[in-house]
Image: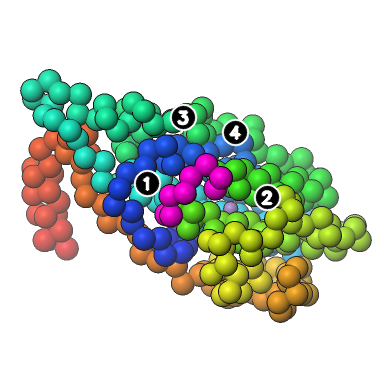
């Protein structure tokens, strides 16, 4: 089962200016082939279907624990897309027949217009073009070596896509989140390499990083590397998954120090508190009525 903490895994300043094209590119990291929904659900289904988990405990624990971190990654991408659409103001008055959002979304790349039409000015379960995320992106063969090999591939595929999204936007909020996710994805690729090495003796970590650009070369990753976040595997459970320490040990790939298990989630940062967008009916065109009902309910608590 899952507990939920009403925070984001990392502090992300809320942007004030909307950037629908950046939002569309970042949405690839939610519902694209190599997005966070794919890493989340691949590890989640592998953990659901894991046979002989007591005997193979460290490998089960690793996959189940990383799946839990991925839940926080979809939340982070969700916040980032919301942030990139924050402050979208209408031009004109709908009651006078104006196309109040034409200026903003009709010229946005990819999925841009869809954010207004179907997306509540927020993230959608689709890629950068608006194509829906697919359940068959999940890979779960039941063969542990093959599944771990796929997970290693998946993390590096995800890193490649993130680097390409990085190349498509200079938006500082998008890049801040990318800097964090590069670092965490690097940990996961490293962890799967160590798991494969334990099982097969093959030193997969010699291939890393893929693509062959070091995290330290990406300015937005540097602060997270300075904190040693690339050496930390968080244990997302009050009492379980302690066996991940049997796999996550040794030295960091950059030689900066030993790998460590952190007993608990990252400190994180606050969730976004965003204004309603009455002109887009979010939550409605006449929000005062809904606010009044909410205030009455809140007063009873
Ligand atoms: Mn991830």
Which residue is under mark 4? Answer: 135
Which residue corresponds to the image point at 32% horizontal and 44% vertical from the top-left? Answer: 18
Which residue is under mark 1? Answer: 84
Quarter of the rendering containing residue 23: top left
Mark 3–mark 2 Cα distance, whole angstroms, equals 24 Å
Neighbor class of circle 3 (other Cα within 10 Å; few <14, some 14-19, many 20+) is: some
Circle 4 SS class = helix
**Residue farthest to the bottom?**
257
Residue 285: image x %, image y %? 14, 35
Which residue corresponds to the image point at 44% horizontal and 67% vertical from the top-left? Answer: 268
Is residue 140 among the parts visible in the rendering?
yes
Which residue is under mark 3? Answer: 110
* N-term-proximal mark, 4 vs 1: 1
Q: Is mark 4 within 8 Å of ligand 1?
A: no
Which residue corresponds to the image point at 70% horizontal and 39% vertical from the top-left? Answer: 139
* N-term-proximal mark, 1 vs 2: 1
Residue 61: image x %, image y %? 68, 62
* N-term-proximal mark, 4 vs 2: 4
Q: Nearer the viewer, residue 60 or 259?
A: 259
Foreground mark, 1 or 2, reads 1
Mark 4–mark 2 Cα distance, whole angstroms, equals 18 Å
Q: Is 163 colored magenta in this rendering?
A: no
Q: Is residue 209 above or below residue 25?
A: below
Q: What label does residue 155 carry, if any?
A: 2
Foreground mark, 4 or 2, reads 2
* N-term-proximal mark, 3 vs 1: 1
The magenta span reads 166-173
Which residue corresponds to the image point at 56% horizontal and 45% vertical from the top-left? Answer: 167
Mark 4–mark 3 Cα distance, whole angstroms, equals 22 Å
């Amino acid at each position: 089962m899952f507990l939920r903490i009403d925070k984001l895994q990392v502090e992300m300043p809320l942007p004030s200016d909307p950037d629908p094209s950046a939002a569309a590119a970042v949405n690839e990291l939610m519902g694209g082939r190599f997005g966070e929904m794919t890493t989340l659900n691949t590890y989640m289904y592998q953990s659901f279907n894991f046979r002989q988990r007591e005997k193979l405990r460290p490998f089960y624990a690793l996959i189940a624990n990383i799946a839990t971190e991925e839940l926080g990654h979809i939340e982070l991408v969700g916040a980032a897309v919301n942030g990139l659409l924050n402050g979208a103001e209408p031009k004109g008055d709908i009651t006078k027949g104006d196309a109040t959002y034409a200026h903003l979304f009709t010229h946005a790349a990819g999925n841009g217009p869809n954010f207004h039409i179907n997306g509540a000015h927020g993230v959608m379960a689709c890629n950068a073009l608006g194509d829906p995320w697919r359940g068959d992106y999940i890979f779960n063969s039941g063969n542990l070596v093959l599944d771990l090999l796929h997970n290693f591939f998946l993390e590096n595929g995800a890193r490649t896509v993130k680097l390409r999204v990085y190349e498509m936007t200079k938006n500082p909020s998008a890049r801040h989140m990318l800097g964090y996710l590069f670092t965490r994805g690097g940990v996961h690729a490293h962890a799967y390499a160590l798991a494969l090495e334990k099982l097969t003796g093959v030193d997969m970590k010699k291939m890393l990083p893929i693509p062959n650009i070091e995290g330290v070369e990406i300015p937005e990753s540097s602060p997270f590397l300075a904190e040693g976040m690339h050496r930390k595997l968080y244990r997302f459970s009050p009492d379980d998954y302690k066996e991940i320490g049997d796999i996550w040990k040794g030295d960091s790939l950059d030689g900066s120090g030993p790998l460590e298990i952190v007993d608990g989630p990252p400190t994180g940062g606050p969730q976004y508190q965003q204004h309603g967008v009455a002109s887009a009916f979010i939550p409605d065109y006449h929000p005062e009525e809904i606010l009044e009902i909410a205030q009455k309910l809140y007063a009873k608590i």
